[in-house]
Image (spheres, rainbow, N blue to C red):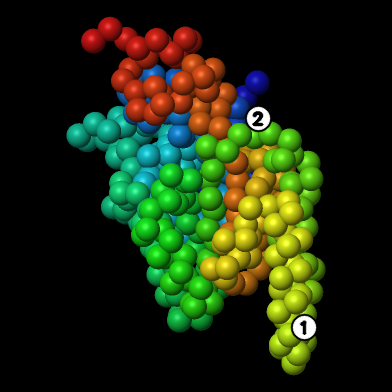
């Protein structure tokens, strides 16, 4: 069987694939990641956890015109591989090779140089405001983990975003929450529903009509919050002014594609909560993600480190 990954040197190449080919690409990309990092060392578990998300983002959004900002940046190996740096992975983190984090001088797809935690939302917000002021419909996306989201800098950015009315999407990559029954078919369906343009247009039209009767508007707002709160933990982010969607399974490519496709068409501030598993697809890393967070060279068959 021919390699799909070998056909991908840019997101434009990725978009030439049919949707039904993408799960096979994800499996191939995981295998490549394990074999590549086994030879060079580097971050592994976090990268295995964002394979589907990275594919979906570059498939749906118009990168590099649309801006992707990865928090910390140690989980950007799939991003680098899909943006023309697959062969350069052999020299990952070497003096003459590519960086282990996004680097603006390395690629037009690396929109923000990272390495520090919790800076992605403020950076993406700045890009979104710049696009708005330029009259551009360019989208800005911040991808942040649940650990980085706990920092004051991230919450300060969320708070500032509430008054900006910019086209900003924040994706919370939650890999500390178990993928259980509450992140299944119902939540994936609700995510597609709540991110759809019909729901959004009804929501916005209702707000305009209810502005005439403030008490009724407040009642409707609380009713919507209650309805969402019954199935989602997003009330906090709604209070910041975001339209909260999720949580959804971050390894369900069809759900990610549908939801991100809907969100791409929406205006304003959106918040997508996805649940992923560190080390996904490589059993040693699934069993011990902390051990395989940053690794030296190892045997890709069993995960055993090479003798130093």
Q: In the displayed structure, does residue 103 sit left or right of residue 29?
A: left
Residue found farthest to the left: 95
- In the image, what residue occupies the spot 38% across and 45% down? 73
Residue 160 in the image, given as x and y percentages of width and height: 43, 72
Q: In this picture, is 226 found above or below 56? A: below
Q: In this picture, is 241 found above or below 92? A: below
Mark positioned earlier in the residue sequence (2 or 1)? 2
Residue 5 in the image, given as x and y percentages of width and height: 55, 32
Q: Quick one: 117 or 238, which is closer to the camera?
A: 238
Q: Quadrant of the N terminus?
A: top right
Secondary structure found at label 2:
helix
Secondary structure found at label 1:
helix
Q: Identify the residue under disc 1.
A: 216
- In the image, what residue occupies the spot 71% across and 73% down? 221
Q: In the displayed structure, does residue 69 sit left or right of residue 296?
A: right
Residue 219 in the image, given as x and y percentages of width and height: 75, 77
Q: Quick one: 1 or 151, which is closer to the camera?
A: 151
Q: In the displayed structure, does residue 56 sit left or right of residue 181?
A: left
Q: Identify the residue under disc 2.
A: 24
Estimate how packed mark 2 is, as few (under 14), some (14 to 19) or many (20 or more) residues with alpha carbons within 10 Å. some
Residue 270 in the image, given as x and y percentages of width and height: 59, 63
């Amino acid at each position: 069987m021919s390699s799909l990954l070998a056909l991908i040197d840019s997101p434009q190449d990725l978009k030439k694939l049919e949707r039904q080919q993408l799960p096979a690409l994800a499996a191939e990309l995981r295998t490549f990641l394990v074999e590549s990092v086994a030879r060079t060392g580097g971050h592994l578990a976090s990268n295995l956890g964002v394979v589907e998300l990275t594919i979906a983002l570059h498939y749906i959004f118009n990168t590099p015109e649309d801006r992707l900002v990865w928090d910390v940046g140690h989980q950007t190996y799939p991003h680098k591989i899909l943006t023309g740096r697959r062969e350069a992975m052999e020299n990952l983190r070497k003096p003459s090779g590519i960086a282990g984090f996004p680097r603006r001088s390395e690629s037009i797809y690396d929109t923000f140089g990272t390495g520090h935690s919790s800076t992605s939302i403020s950076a993406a917000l700045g890009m979104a405001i710049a696009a708005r002021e330029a009259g551009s419909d360019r989208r800005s996306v911040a991808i942040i983990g649940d650990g980085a989201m706990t920092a004051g800098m991230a919450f300060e950015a969320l708070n500032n975003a509430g008054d900006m009315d910019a086209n900003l999407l924040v994706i919370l990559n939650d890999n500390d929450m178990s993928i259980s029954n509450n992140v299944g078919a119902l939540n994936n369906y609700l995510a597609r529903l709540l991110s759809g343009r019909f729901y959004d247009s009804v929501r916005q039209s209702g707000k305009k009509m209810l502005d005439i009767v403030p008490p009724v508007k407040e009642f409707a707002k609380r009713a919507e919050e209650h309805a969402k709160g019954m199935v989602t933990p997003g009330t906090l982010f709604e209070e910041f002014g975001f339209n909260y969607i999720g949580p959804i399974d971050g390894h369900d490519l069809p759900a990610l594609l549908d939801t991100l496709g809907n969100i791409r068409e929406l205006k304003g501030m959106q918040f997508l909560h996805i649940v992923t598993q560190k080390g996904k697809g490589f059993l040693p890393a699934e069993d011990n993600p902390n051990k395989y967070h940053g690794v030296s060279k190892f045997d890709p068959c069993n995960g055993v480190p090479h003798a130093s």
